[in-house]
Image (tube, coloured by chain):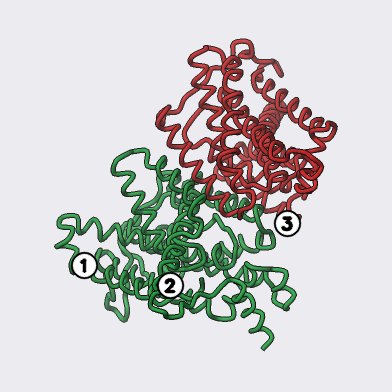
Amino acid sequence: MDPSFILIQTLNGVQYGLLLFLIASGLTLIFGIMHIINLAHGALYMVGAYLAFWLTGYTGNLFLAIVLALPLAVALGIAIERFLIQRLYERDHLDQVLLTFGLILVFDALQSIFWGNDVHGVAVPALLSGSIALTDNLNYPVYRLFISAICLAIALGMYVLIQRTRLGMIIRGGASNREMVSALGINIRWVYTLVFAVGAALAAFAGMIAAPVSSVYPGMGSTILIICFVVVVIGGLGSVKGAFLGALMVGLVYTWGTVLVPQFAGAVVYALMAAVLLWKPRGLFA
Amino acid sequence: MHSVSRPIQILLVLLSALLLLYPLFGEALAGNAYDYWLQKMTTVMILAILAVSLDLLVGVAGMVSIAHAAFFGLAGYTVVLVAPEWEPGNLWILLPAALVIAALASLVMGLLIIRTSGIFFIMATIAFSQMIYYIFHDSDFAGGSDGAYLFSTPETMVMGRSLLDLGDRLTLFYVTLISLLLIYLLLRIVLRAPFGRVLIGIRENEQRVRALGYNPSFYKLSAFVIGGTIAGFAGVLSAIQYQYIDPSQVNWHLSAEVLVMVILGGLGSLYGPILGAFAFEGLHYTFSSFTRHWQLPMGIVVIVMVLMLPRGIAGGLEWLSERLGRRFEAPAPSARKPTEEHRAAEQHND
């Protein structure tokens, strides 16, 4: 195994891990702050990917498609929170599981009605379609580096937002004591709506930028949802830092698993999860 | 909710009798579709076994598990893979093997996650059950995503004679029906026993049960393994009925559907989830008869159900039965949750 091959696989693993972080961070934030388990989070990723595919078809440009699709995703997030999730804050987790499972069924059916059940591809934007020479005979696609860079920038932005701003302070306060925050005159309902919409937008955005790499297909949301559960379980519920490290670990283990033990590629990340749970039963940072 | 009132008991006996007698009047009623409905009802009863065993975990012990299909499918795969390829397998080997595998899998999974609770527990059950799904989906030994066939129905030899021909649809129908009734009665007995009382206590207040000197983890793990093993039994019946298994029967979507059956029927009532399985499959059948996209109306039903009818069919029946009871001025024995808890506490003090 030559070093450039190792480098490429590692870069792929990091890129996949960073993408997982975008989705898993929304999941873990929605749990940490709102105490809601959202099974439809993967469906939002799928919606993002299909919107990117659909709008790229119209506009001919992925970036334009993303600019048009993001407000749609935010609106969808707000609508889901306002009309459905909001009724579940005082209810059991079981009800949250069922309602969001119902949403998955609805989204899967709508996807099948609007876009059919074929696998679609989305073209990499011309600007980023080149590749960078790593060695004399090995190239690495620029678009994958671009995904990593964007995800890193968002992760950094989230850190600053949550740890360094007033809004972040309110969010952290809402996570630890909801009643106290609303007693201080802050409209916690809007904070919840905001957090849910941002989580939904992050998942949808991840779907959009992943579309050229992973292609667009039915059931893609379900696959990514489970992997993100693994990330959140490893990192510890509600911890964004845990989600970041968990996502990188899962991304690397998954990519290397596919290379080294293709027969059990799907199962290695779960072995990692089992190992973490044996060591820390509540995840690394909980 | 844990003792069944008289009117509901009568209803359940009537429904069971109706099923039991279906082969007698079915031909007159359904005509050419008789055979189709016989098989369909066998399938629904298998799902009902799955649902009632999940109710033990979710409704009784308060553990929201989305791993139930994993044990169902694992047992089914065991039957298909252990059976010899060119001759009928021996049920007295296949059945125990499948049950042991399902029990072991639920024990190992349970040991890893039983100490967690809430959302973490839910996520971990989904994740581990998907691990089992991917093992079957990605690898060759079980046919990968194409699934695997059981080439001949297992034999039930007792002292050199075949006891039952499970390949016969009518026989399998009765075997499934009787299994369902026996499992239901077994779980009812478990609920009345101190073991069941402790489980109910854990759902209501785990700290208090711990303070009374019980070890909640032991009881939860036992319930998890019992539930997983019964799910495995359902998986064996399903493998025998379809003579085929594929990874979709291990997928968490099936687990979530069974969970919908449990809630639709009525959480914690044991008989409710059985009715829920029939209701869910009835809806599924109705919706898919007029649209290919049956998931859309089904999803909407699930959402509306969660928002409007949290107590399910059993809740509705109990409300009706209480009104009936009042009309005839008979006391309706409907135990409230806190009473159960106190009873669990009292039993310990005795």
Q: Is residue B293 above or below residue B286?
A: above
For residue B308, side relative to residue B32 (left or right): right
Which residue lies at the image location 41% right of the left edge and 64% below the top edge? B274
Q: Is residue A183 above or below residue A108?
A: below
- Quadrant for the N terminus of chain A, please: top right
The residue wearing badge 3 is A281
Residue type highlighted by circle 1: Pro
For residue B231, side relative to residue B241 (left or right): right
Element type at mark 3: loop
Badge 1 sits on which subunit? B
For disc 1, the neighbor class at 10 Å (few under 14, some 14 to 19, many from 20) is some
Which image quadrant for residue B343? bottom right
Residue type highlighted by circle 2: Tyr
Residue type highlighted by circle 3: Pro
Element type at mark 2: helix
Q: Position of residue B187 (x, y in %)?
A: 48, 74
Question: In the rendering, which numbered label is found on residue A279?
Answer: none
Q: Position of residue A63 (x, y in %)?
A: 61, 16
Q: Position of residue B147 (x, y in %)?
A: 40, 48
The residue wearing badge 1 is B23
Q: Is residue B178 above or below residue A253?
A: below
Cβ atoms under marks 2 and 1 closer than 8 Å: no
Q: Is residue A116 visible?
A: yes
- Does label 3 lie on the same chain as label 2? no
Badge 2 sits on which subunit? B
Q: Colour of chain B?
A: green
Q: Which chain is red?
A: A
Question: In the rendering, which numbered label is found on residue B184?
Answer: 2
